[in-house]
């Protein structure tokens, strides 16, 4: 998939545990784990906004487009 999720990097930078973020955002740790690993087909903007607000970051800090055709 050309979209790479960098949530784990931002969690490490902010020194926030997945459990803490999941509880604040209102999603399960299992769903957060799926999101971190990139095994989701989509994310609601409200969820993305809540994650960005809690981690004080922009969506571009969490998601990256990698063009696999150019490799």
Image (tube, rainbow, N blue to C red):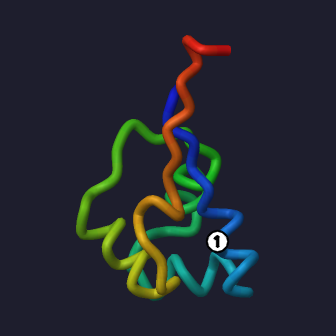
Q: Is residue 54 left or right of residue 47?
A: right
Q: In which quarter of the image is the C terminus?
A: top right
Q: Which residue is drawn at 52% across and 83% down?
A: 55
Q: Which residue is drawn at 35% across and 66% down?
A: 48
Q: What element carries label 1?
A: helix
Q: Residue at x 25, y 62 (%)?
A: 45
Image x and y of residue 61, in percent: 52, 64
**Corner quadrant of residue 69:** top right
Front-most of 14 and 25?
14
Q: Which residue lies under the disc numbered 1?
A: 10
Image x and y of residue 9, in percent: 70, 65
Front-most of 29 and 65?
65
Image x and y of residue 63, in percent: 49, 52
**For residue 1, above or below residue 52:** above
Front-most of 60 and 54?
60
**For residue 44, above or below residue 41:** below
Image x and y of residue 1, in percent: 53, 26
């Amino acid at each position: 998939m050309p979209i790479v999720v960098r949530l784990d990097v931002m969690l490490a930078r902010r020194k926030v545990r997945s459990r803490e973020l999941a509880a604040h955002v209102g999603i399960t740790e299992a769903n957060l784990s799926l999101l971190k690993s990139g095994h989701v087909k989509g994310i609601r903007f409200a969820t993305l906004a809540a994650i960005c607000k809690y981690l004080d970051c922009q969506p571009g800090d969490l998601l990256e487009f990698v063009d696999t055709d150019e490799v």
